[in-house]
Image (cartoon, grey):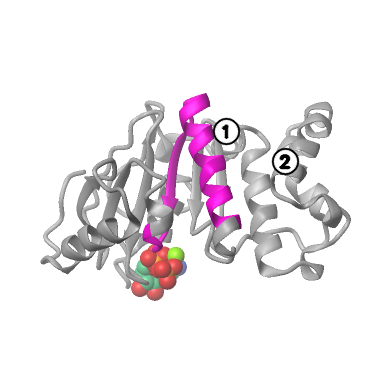
């Protein structure tokens, strides 16, 4: 058995923008899947908005996730048979909110620079375009919580910065709570706090506001992740 996460004790406040950093295999995606209720922890609990995800019935959890959480998967998880518009609108259409889907789609296509790809299926898109569709699908419900797994991993620096600005705006202007996995210090500087995972343990966290440059954040991250993995409550 692989113990992907061990004794992680993480609290994220409402309206926080948190980055999760750590080496490949340190448990970042596993942590995000636990927060989304897509994986059940073998020990411990996950509570969101005062509700224990482990105590919800499947249907209840599905609805809770659809209405409260937007998830950007590391591997996008787009539906191959649906085009860009249908993939982005899926969380609203699944909820019978056709009119909202119609009104929210255009601004999302425009912001993510996907308007001229609207009728393409995922296999007709570049990696970066697929990633932007995944971001659009997560954002179309304007969810209270956004869980994004390396959402800029396949984007060039300008597009990546733009996505960071969209997330930052959701947090600053609309009080959304965002947990974003990234290994790029230039992306993590957009967040307020960095949580560092190492070998499945949380080794600490630090605020980003004292850093003017990504290099300084990178140095702090390196120092924290090279320390012994003891496990910290963050
Ligand atoms: N379903 C699974 N069954 C068994 N082991 C798993 C499973 N999912 C993940 N793991 C293992 O758990 C560990 C953490 O995986 P995880 O995907 O969370 O890493 P990560 O930090 O997201 O890495 P990356 O940066 O490469 O995406 C890895 O060693 C991985 O091999
Ligand atoms: Mg991962």
Q: Residues within 10 Å of mark 2 (few under 14, many from 20)?
A: many
> Is residue 201 in sight in this rendering?
no
Residue shown at 11% from the left, 60% from the top: 230
Q: Residues within 10 Å of mark 1 (few under 14, many from 20)?
A: many
Question: What secondary structure characterizes most of the magenta part?
Answer: helix
Left or right of 211 in this view: 29:
right
In the picture of the structure, the residue carrying the numbered disc 1 is 143
> Is residue 184 in sight in this rendering?
yes
Percent across and percent down for residue 234 are: 21, 43
Between residue 222 and residue 121, name the one nearer to us: 222
Count of numbered circles in the view? 2
Is the residue marked 1 within 8 Å of ligand 2, measured from its CB?
no
Q: Secondary structure at mark 2?
A: helix
Q: Earlier in the sequence, mark 1 or mark 2?
A: 2
- Segment colored magenta: 159-185
In the picture of the structure, the residue carrying the numbered disc 2 is 108
Percent across and percent down for residue 115 are: 82, 49
């Amino acid at each position: 058995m692989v113990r992907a996460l061990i004794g992680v004790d993480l609290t994220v406040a409402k309206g926080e923008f948190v980055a999760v950093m750590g080496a490949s295999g340190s448990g970042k995606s596993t942590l995000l899947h636990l927060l989304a209720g897509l994986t059940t922890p073998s020990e411990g609990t996950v509570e969101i908005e005062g509700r224990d995800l482990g105590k919800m019935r499947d249907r209840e959890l599905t609805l809770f996730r659809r209405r409260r959480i937007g998830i950007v998967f590391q591997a996008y998880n787009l539906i191959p048979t649906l085009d860009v518009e249908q993939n982005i609108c899926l969380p609203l259409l699944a909820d019978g909110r056709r009119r909202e889907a119609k009104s929210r789609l255009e601004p999302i296509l425009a912001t993510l620079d996907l308007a001229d790809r609207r009728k393409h299926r995922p296999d007709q898109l570049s990696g970066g375009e697929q990633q932007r569709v995944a971001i659009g699908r997560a954002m179309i419900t304007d969810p209270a919580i956004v869980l994004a797994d390396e959402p800029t991993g396949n984007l060039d620096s300008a597009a990546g910065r733009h996505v960071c600005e969209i997330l930052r705006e959701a947090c600053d202007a609309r009080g959304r709570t965002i947990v974003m996995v990234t290994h790029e210090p230039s992306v993590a500087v957009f967040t307020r706090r960095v949580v560092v995972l190492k070998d499945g343990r949380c080794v600490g966290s630090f605020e980003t506001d004292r850093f003017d440059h990504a290099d300084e954040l990178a140095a702090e991250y390196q120092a924290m992740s090279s320390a012994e993995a003891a496990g910290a409550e963050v």
